[in-house]
Amino acid sequence: MKFDFIKATVLSGALILVSLVSNATEGKTKKKKSTSQPRIEIVNFSGSYNSGNTIDILCEVKSNCCYNIIVERSKNGKKFTSIGSFSDNKNLAEYMMVDNSPNKTNYYRLKIIDNQGNVDYSNLMVTQLYNANEVVSMVNITPVTKEKNLQVSLDLKNRAFVIMKVMDDKGNEIFQKRVTGETGENCFDIDGSKDMTPGNYTLEVRVNNTNQLVLPLVKK
């Protein structure tokens, strides 16, 4: 499958999961009604760590209309600011941005605007950076979607034992994965997570039996 590669517009630092835009309004003329609604879907979203504490972000977009996507970042997942944007009308396109000034903890989301002015927000992607004396440099969480399992990416300075757990809103463990991570970048799928029912969950990631990240998850 061939992708169109497009460089995103950077507003402040640079940077960069899954959302459908619907509720389109009908045309004003009664003679000809639109039979399809605008649809914009972010089918893939991932981040990787670079030396110098920068983060590369990759995003694949599937659409049947023109769109504008504003990239927003937050330290706490509550107050967001815009750091970049991109727009296009291609059916399938791939974008890459670089966050040159990430925080220690970074919540990323996309504000998605279709050609009729409908606005939607993506789920959050979270990236956690660590100190130089820790075995892990970065943990990146890619949101679970209808098409993609939850992905956990880790950049490790040494070989390490990794435990990943997903709990439901009552604290019941529904998924667990235990793996050995190698030095450098590692990416692990939580098999079956794309079939989770919509709702609120929690992800816990441990490296060498140390709590590294506890993150709330939302499955739409």
Image (tube, helix red, strand yellow):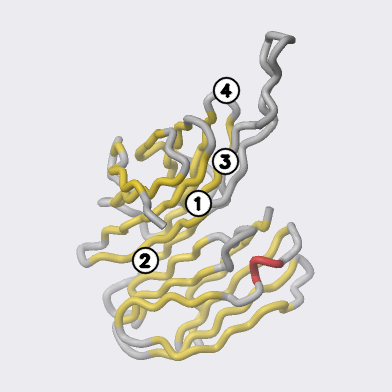
Q: What residue type is labelled 4?
A: Gln
SS under mark 1 = loop
Which percent across, then down, holds residue 60?
Answer: 44, 51
Q: What residue type is labelled 1?
A: Asn
Q: Is residue 183 left or right of residue 216?
A: left
Location of mark 2 (residue): 129
Q: Are marks 2 and 3 in contact (CB under 8 Å)?
A: no
Distance Cα–Cα, label 2 vs label 4: 38 Å
Q: Measuring 38% from the left and 49% from the top, which residue is drawn there?
A: 94
Q: Are marks 4 and 3 in contact (CB under 8 Å)?
A: no
Q: Measuring 31% from the left and 43% from the top, which residue is drawn there?
A: 6
Q: Which amino acid does label 2 sit on?
A: Leu
Residue 116 is marked as 4
Location of mark 1 (residue): 76
Badge 2: how crowded within 10 Å, few (<14), some, or many (20+)?
many
- Marks 2 and 4, the one that precedes in the sequence: 4
Location of mark 3 (residue): 121
Distance Cα–Cα, label 2 vs label 3: 24 Å
Q: Looking at the image, how many numbered discs can be counted on the residues?
A: 4
